[in-house]
Image: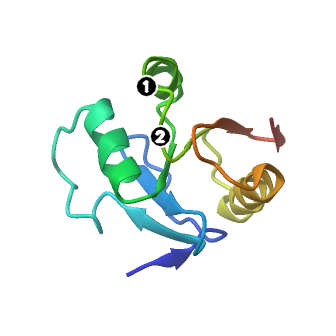
Amino acid sequence: MTRPASTPTRTSPSKSWFICARSATTCSRHEAGKSNRRIEDDAVLTFATASCRSVITLNRRDFVQLHRMIPTHAGIIVRTEDRDSASLARRVDAAIREKGELANLLVRVVRGGSD
């Protein structure tokens, strides 16, 4: 099942999302058949890139470092925890719309805004 990018429902730090910016759909690790597994961050990024999907994650520190090490990818969105999923969805959507194409970009979405 896919969801519009503007309606994320999972906020667990152990979950990464894969976003296909062109069709504005998301795919959770569970939906990708990757849940309940200890998957290395670079494997998550490789899977997302091969699927032409960006990653959205709470794992900011590791994925910022990974972006520096592997600058060619379908996009990485790092975010902060926010229990207000509607507000988070609006900020993620606004960040995606502002950047347009996410390929090779690192986008930060924080509570109260994005950069």
Residue located 43% across and 40% down the image? 13
Q: In terms of image quadrants, where is residue 84?
A: bottom right
In the rendered view, tell whether residue 67 sits above or below residue 107: above
Which residue extends farthest left?
A: 37
Residue located 50% across and 47% down the image? 74
Indicate the quadrant containing the N terminus: top left, top right, bottom left or bottom right.
Answer: bottom left
Q: Nearer the viewer, residue 34 or 71?
A: 71
Residue type highlighted by circle 2: His
Which residue extends farthest bottom?
A: 1
In the rendered view, tell whether residue 75 sits above or below residue 50: above
Q: In terms of image quadrants, where is residue 46?
A: top left
Q: In the visual, does 24 lie left or right of 72?
A: right
Indicate the quadrant containing the C terminus: top left, top right, bottom left or bottom right.
Answer: top right
Q: In the visual, does 100 lie left or right of 53?
A: right
* Residue that numbered label 1 is attached to: 70
Residue located 84% across and 41% down the image? 112
x and y percentages locating residue 7 in the rendered image = 62, 71
x and y percentages locating residue 86 in the rendered image = 71, 65
x and y percentages locating residue 53 in the rendered image = 46, 57
Find numbered disc 2 in the image and state the secondary structure of the residue it sits on: loop
Separation of disc 2 and disc 1 at Cα?
Answer: 7 Å
Find numbered disc 1 in the image and state the secondary structure of the residue it sits on: loop
In the rendered view, tell whether residue 60 sits above or below residue 69: below
In the rendered view, tell whether residue 54 sits above or below residue 93: above
Residue located 38% across and 51% down the image? 48
* Residue that numbered label 2 is attached to: 73
| Dot 2 alpha-carbon crowd within 10 angstroms: few under 14, some 14 to 19, many 20 or more | many
Q: In the visual, does 73 lie left or right of 87?
A: left
x and y percentages locating residue 45 in the rendered image = 37, 40
Residue type highlighted by circle 1: Ile
CB atoms at circles 2 and 1 under 8 Å apart? yes
